[in-house]
Image (cartoon, rainbow, N blue to C red):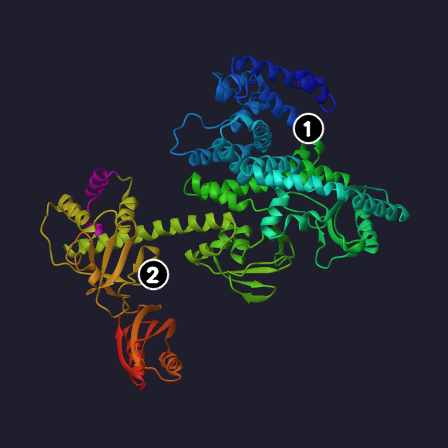
Amino acid sequence: MPTVHDLAERLNEYLSPEKVARIKRAYFYAEQAHEGQMRRSGERYITHPLAVANILSEMHMDHQSLMAAMLHDVLEDTAVSKEAIVEQFGQGVADLVDGVSKLTHLEFESKVEEQAENFQKMVLAMSKDIRVILVKLADRLHNMRTMGVMPPEKKRRKSRETLEIYAPIALRLGINDLRIELENLSFESIYPLRATRIRSAMRKQLGHRKEVVRHIEEALATRLLQEGIEAQVSGREKHLYSIYKKMREKRKSLKEILDVYAFRIITDSVDSCYRILGSVHNLYKPVPNRFKDYIAVPKTNGYQSLHTNLIGANGVPIEIQIRTQDMEDMANHGIAAHWLYKTDDTQGGQTHARARRWVKNLLEMQERAGDSMEFIENVKIDLFPDEIYVFTPKGEIMELPRGATPIDFAYAVHTDVGNACVGCLVNRKLSPLSQPLISGDSIKVITAPGARANPAWLNFVFTAKARANIRHFLATMEQQDAIGLGKKLLDSQLRNFGTDLEAVSGEAISTVLLESNLKDAEHLFAEIGSGQKPVYIIARRLLQLSQGDTLTSPQGSLTIQGTEGLRIKYGKCCRPIPGDPIVGVMSKGKGMVVHIEQCRNIADLRHDPDRCVHLHWEKSMEGEFLVDLRIDLSNVRGVLASVANAVSHAEANIESIQMQDIDAITSRVSLLVAVTGRTQLSRVLRRLHALPAVAKIERV
């Protein structure tokens, strides 16, 4: 087991003696705090923080990160307070330690909820200092390395959490070495038999492959030497989990995947990378459409390289990655390279900026999410590694996950652009908002003032940011709609009693708010509009407090204009349309549902003043409403075309049509027709009745 002195020797290579001394002091402080504590494996507990610091030292992390690694379990597992750490080691180290520490003082309903809350706390800490996640990843890696003594169920749970959250975060931050080890250790814990089989097959293949690999390496090196290009050529091994993932996703056998020979070529400059690409394409035939230039357009995590697929001698498939040494360091250490390079104009600085943008997006999602469970689901969606690159109208490149739609693009530009989106141009052509984008697309979002996010977008948006913003917007709009509807309902009910809302005294409203345990009048209106509080009882109570009056007057009705928003819905059982006699039924938490007066589903509620509100349509009502029609007709050739034609001539739209045979000569057609009101419905019925084949029509 490495000691703190071994670590100090390694740190002397890149840190000053004074900083190394501070790290050693943090170690001795943690050793004293954890005195007497043992790991499940039987080792002293201090071996874990020391191992985490060793992992971070391999990434050349700064002294504060290494001090936080030494102290990361002190707050959680000992009596030491954050204030004591501030006093001993400064505010920066204390904040890092606090960010990594779990929420141990709260009660959770389940392990899943605990995981979600802990991750939410960590994201807040990450937004202040990105090093929090690097310490956490190193902590998780050592825990995964030493999981052998844990119960099987806990091993599986931790491994799934690692595969779903921590390995994708490592990938997002570009820390490839750490990500590969996390994935392999998790895979071996969840599927030990599969891992053993794949490893065994890899060992067998290795014996057969050595000669081929050596031959291809020599051929590549000789060609580069002839061209006068300095470069190192090496065979590249695939790791366990990536082989398993490819088998599962591409439906390929293990033999097909292992038959591909992979190489990496490291050179001194970007110019040499492109010259090497030309050389290898001259040596072996490139596979069409399998070349990727991540140097010109880096991945989201800052990864840069040229990827190409070739067909070698005897049809051997070859994969080649070409990059500079700096790109190689960036590919292996990702954001951790920022502390290695330091300056802002290097790849490290750019990667750090990308990581900050990602954390900022996480923070925005966290603010928009309803709870920690919804947030962590959003994060999982957001951690997809596959990207596409699309262009704004000004020619700027934007990265989006594969499967993203124009709506995702709109929200990626700005939340307000997404909320106001009404259409889009993809490659200068009007396209559906649900169309998945592909790399190279140029997108222009069409917005309109006063436009609203559509709930239907949730069925096809891909990014977590878009999903969270749409849900937040709809929740806010529902609240505003509920307030507007509630105020309207209360005013209407008070008018039925011979007064109105303006005539009610402020004292009466304050008393009702106090009795209902609500903050202000807006909250009261929202409760009424969402069906939580009966408007009849609130109106009677206000009247009683305001005038001492308990007499009722004949009930009037409320006008429906069709612009009330999300809090008014139309019953699918009877499908009311303008012109029908209607009533509104208040449904708890859902607002008002409009039904036809004679609808059988509300027979028990029709005379309940707490739940039922008499309504009438605004004369200038606009919009389309759906009507169910049932038509019995003769089963003759072309009858469906005649029905569709008749509806079309009445200037109505058919939303859906179903046909079933009743007997050998009669069929029944179920039509869902969109009309503006009873006048247009009458026109549709007249046109249908005029068809010779039609025997009977009824509105369902």
Q: Choose top left, top right, bottom left or bottom right for residue 524.
A: top left
Please state which of the two labelled residues, at mark 1 or mark 2, is closer to the viewer.
1
- Point out residue 190 in the picture as x, y percentages from the top left corner: 54, 37
Q: Which residue is mark 2?
A: 563
Q: What quarter of the picture does the N terminus occupy? A: top right
Q: Amino acid at mark 2?
A: Thr
Residue 43 lies within the magenta run? no
Identify which residue is drawn at 24% across, 54% down.
586
- Point out residue 595 in the picture as x, y percentages from the top left corner: 24, 62
Residue 658 vertical placement versus 533 (above, below): below
- Say if residue 355 shows up in the picture: no
- Point out residue 146 in the picture as x, y percentages from the top left corner: 58, 26
Q: Camera-side residue: 638 or 208?
A: 208
Residue 689 vertical placement versus 126 (above, below): below
- Say if residue 375 shows up in the picture: yes
Residue 508 lies within the magenta run? yes
Q: Choose top left, top right, bottom left or bottom right for residue 555.
A: bottom left
Does 108 sit left or right of 601 as displayed? right
Q: Which residue is mark 1?
A: 58
Which residues are drawn in magenta?
Answer: 501-517
Mark 2 Cα shell of 10 Å, populated few (<14), some (14-19), many (≥20)? few
Secondary structure state at the residue bearing disc 1: helix
Q: Residue furthest bottom?
A: 692
Tag 2 or tag 1, which sits nearer the N-term?
Answer: 1
In the rendered structure, find residue 134 and report the number of the disc placed on it.
none
- Point out residue 46 in the picture as x, y percentages from the top left corner: 57, 18
